[in-house]
Amino acid sequence: MLKLDLGCSKSKKESFLGVDMDPKSDAEFIWDLEKGLPFLNNSMVDEIYCRHVLEHIDNIILLIKEIYRVCKDGATVQLIVPEKDSNSAYELEHKRYFSLSSLICVSSPKYRERYGFNFRNIKNEILDDTGTNNKQIRAVLEVVKRNEKT
């Protein structure tokens, strides 16, 4: 079972292979996610965990298309980003802001037709760090490739 932690930094998820551009990270693959995931074959990944990465990406559509390409049918993708009204949303390195509906869009028919990726929403939620203003948004998605040639 192949599981990837994209942008793992120094806190890679247990039993996952890490991908990060920082050579000081816990990653097995030192790679800039802005360039996609060309070192992976189609439909080989069972699970992707991507925490606090999408807000740093210029071409988010490219990365989401690449996540879809490398995942098997039925793979789980977990995306976690700072919520737009959270204190942590406005760090200088962040290139975009997210609301709950931002991640729900990933599974919409509009984006499926426009970009060719197909995700089914399993769960969308706001995670509230009680006592702080550091809310996060988590989307859990299932990759749908049935009736598709891979």
Image (cartoon, helix red, strand yellow):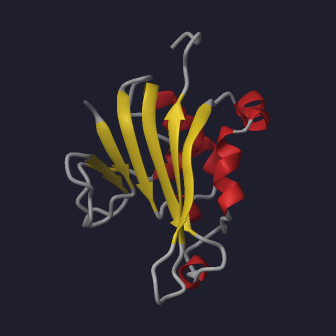
Is 84 or 70 nearer to us in this picture? 84
Locate the N terminus by quadrant: top left
| Residue lying farthest to the left in this orientation | 15
Report x, y in % for residue 7: 39, 57
Report x, y in % for residue 51: 43, 60
Q: Is residue 76 left or right of residue 98?
A: left
Residue depicted at 59% across the width and 10% down the height: 147
In this rendering, the answer to whether 150 lies above or below 19 is above
In this rendering, the answer to whether 107 lies above or below 89 is above
Residue depicted at 26% across the width and 55% down the height: 13
Report x, y in % for residue 60: 62, 51
Q: Quadrant of residue 11?
A: bottom left
Residue depicted at 66% across the width and 69% down the height: 97
Is 73 or 129 nearer to us in this picture? 129
In this rendering, the answer to whether 80 lies above or below 4 is below
Report x, y in % for residue 44: 36, 25
Residue depicted at 55% across the width and 75% down the height: 93
Q: Is residue 139 left or right of residue 29?
A: right
Total count of labels:
0
Q: Is residue 77 left or right of residue 60?
A: left
Q: Quadrant of residue 23?
A: bottom left
